[in-house]
Amino acid sequence: MPRFLLRPWTKERLLCGYYWDGARREVRVRKRGIGAFCKELDLLSLNAAGLRPDALENDFFGTVDDRGAKVRVAVLRDVGALGAGQRTDFARLLLSLDARRPSAVAKLKTEGAAHLRDSIDLDPEVNAAMLVHGIEATPVFMIDEGNLPPVPTHFMKADG
């Protein structure tokens, strides 16, 4: 969770984290410093070739965080005065925080990677391009070996 979101809710540098204690069947609270809630370093770092390690945080979540940070100021002033767009921006921020939980990221990394690998090997366009270049190995094998040929420009999407 971005620390900028937590700072306004701290009291004497402590933040209250509420959670459900199933054994006691009650809501409990832990009071800790912000660092106790923001301690997963490089959680969303990427190791993909050609991408900056912080690309996911900056390029994907950056806009969500920027808009959410602006609305956070308005929430602290007067939550009742928020417009529909501001409410949407803040809701988007809160939903993105759920997607960034360590358990959600771990699941995405394992299941998402397996799905992506399967879909690359089954993609008819990718396989056709491989055959045009006389490559008989599977696309995933080529990726794993780091032996990918340059991608012909006619296979690149116009939007990026």
Image (cartoon, helix red, strand yellow):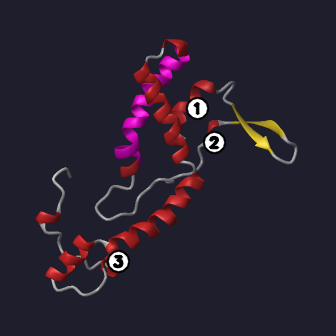
**Vertical placement of residue 145 versus 123, above or below:** below
Give left or right: position of 52 versus 10.
left
Q: Residues within 10 Å of mark 2 (few under 14, many from 20)?
A: some
Q: Amino acid at mark 3?
A: Val
Residue at the (53%, 35%) spot, across then down? 94
- Determine the residue positioned at 11% across, 64% down: 154
Q: Residues within 10 Å of mark 1 (few under 14, many from 20)?
A: some
Out of 12 and 10, give the one closest to the viewer: 10
Q: Amino acid at mark 1?
A: Leu
Q: Which residue is mark 3?
A: 140
Q: Secondary structure at mark 2?
A: helix
Task: Tell me the mark number nearer the camera, choosing from 1 and 3.
Answer: 3
Position of residue 101 measured from the top left corner of the image (x, y, whole percent):
57, 49
- Identify the residue position indicated by label 1 in the image: 6
| Residue numbers of the magenta segment | 57-77
**Does label 2 or label 1 sit earlier along the sequence?**
1
The image quadrant of residue 67 is top left
Residue under circle 2? Answer: 37
